[in-house]
Image (tube, rainbow, N blue to C red):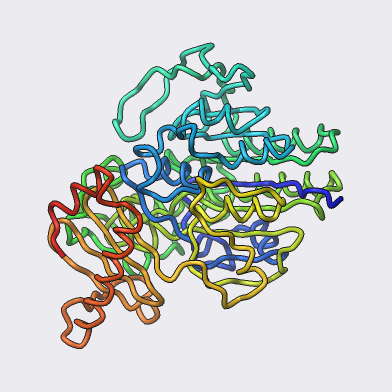
Amino acid sequence: MTLKPNILFILTDDQRFDMLGRLGQAPVQTPNLDRLAASGTRFTHAFIPGGTCGAVCMPSRAMIHSGRSLFRIQGCGEAVPAEHALLGETLRTAGYDTYGIGKWHNGPTAYARSFTDGAEIFFGGMADHWNVPACRFDPTGRYDTAQPLIRDPYLTRTVTCQVCDHVTPGAHSTDLFAGAAVDFLKQRTAQDPFFLYVAFMAPHDPRSMPERFMQQYDPQTIGLPPNFRAEHAIDTGALRIRDEQLAASPRQPDEIRRHLHEYYAMITHLDEGIGHILDALRDSGRWDHTVIVVASDNGLAVGQHGLMGKQSVYEHSVRVPLILAGPGVPAGQDREAPVYLSDLFPTLAEMAGVPVPASVEGHSLVPCLSDPLHRVHEALYLAYADSIRGVRKDDWKLIEYAAGDTQLFDLANDPYEQHSVADRPDQQTRVADLRRDLIRLRDAGDDRSHPAGAAFWSRRSI
């Protein structure tokens, strides 16, 4: 009988696709992630489809854990209904010990279904990294023992948390969560396979980290992205949301450089924490029998296109890092196939030899690992709330705004999406073809059945 592999799933928060040191396009230092990518396969075109609310990470995480598509999760992903199987729940039923650490944004009930144990569990979207209101594992699944205050990230108010039972003051969230994962790996003696899920809060704002990571970067050498703009010219429907208020408008170059400095430093600190987990896995003797996944829940603009947040369908917001390593994964290779993070559920189930539940809609990426040319998606459907829809196919992206604007980008020649060619006469056939793809994918994904989709399509006739 073949033993099932262990699974280590690391999820970061707001880490853009190009934030991978020498593997990316920005001067960020991530030596541990670079080494992991060299030992595994990097999916260079991994995406989320967007989000149905300002807290884009909430539906993103619901899709990762349920394998469902954007408009077929419950609401904005604040909870996962019982009829939608969860990744941890599925592995747990198949004999895995499932252990959850860090941020969980989809409700205590879904967490309790997913994990047999856990530590330093944070229910929410964001908090002070140095004073994380976290939970010890509650086998009853109620998580109702105390009520510390946390910051609601998109209502910009302080709320009473119903589920957190302790705060570790002075411990940064990255060190808190990485330390809990290291402890799990060091202390584990059971022979059953494990699913270790570690969800960091970094590099989500408020961006803070030990000062030594800031000192690794010279702020005078931090350049602005090519698509830096003082303001965004089109109404995205989210220009006054919380994320966009993190910097003054119009955007000032020096302020954006400061944000980038903090973003890079926070990612390098995060990389160190991930390195501690990977070292502990090696030291445990389980490295060769563990599938490792590293991904992020969404990207972030940080000054690109005059935006700060992730409430758009530009590459900087919907394209994310994705690395797989371990048994059955080719070493030192890239895959350019367009994929969704919701494809990870069936991928890991297949690698574990576990049946994929009927509720899962994603596609296994295992064929992509063996065949570099294999594609599981012909085109990707992209959306933000009730204001933006898009389709990405081959090297082209069409974006439609409820406000009436249309953009078309040739991504091969314009990777920073700076020059829309939607109005050029020689591109009208392409615009029409991509609009047909948009409508086809809209209908296949039940967009109009969701309140956000119904609102968008009532405003925009294409």
Q: Nearer the viewer, residue 416 or 69?
A: 69
Residue 80 can be seen in this image: yes
Q: Quadrant of residue 167?
A: top right
Q: Is residue 206 left or right of residue 214?
A: left
**Above or below for 332 versus 12:** below
Q: Is residue 305 above or below residue 265?
A: below
Answer whether residue 262 is visible to the viewer in this image: no
Measured as percent of width and height from the top left, residue 254 is found at 33, 56
Give how far across and how far down residue 391 sits, in percent. Answer: 32, 66
Q: Give the farthest residue toward the top.
A: 145
Residue 63: x, y in percent? 47, 46
Left or right: where 421 falls relative to 270: left
Q: Residue at x 42, y 24 (%)?
A: 150
Q: Residue at x 20, y 88 (%)?
A: 426
Q: Is residue 328 found left or right of 127 in the rendered image? A: right
Q: Residue at x 13, y 61 (%)?
A: 461
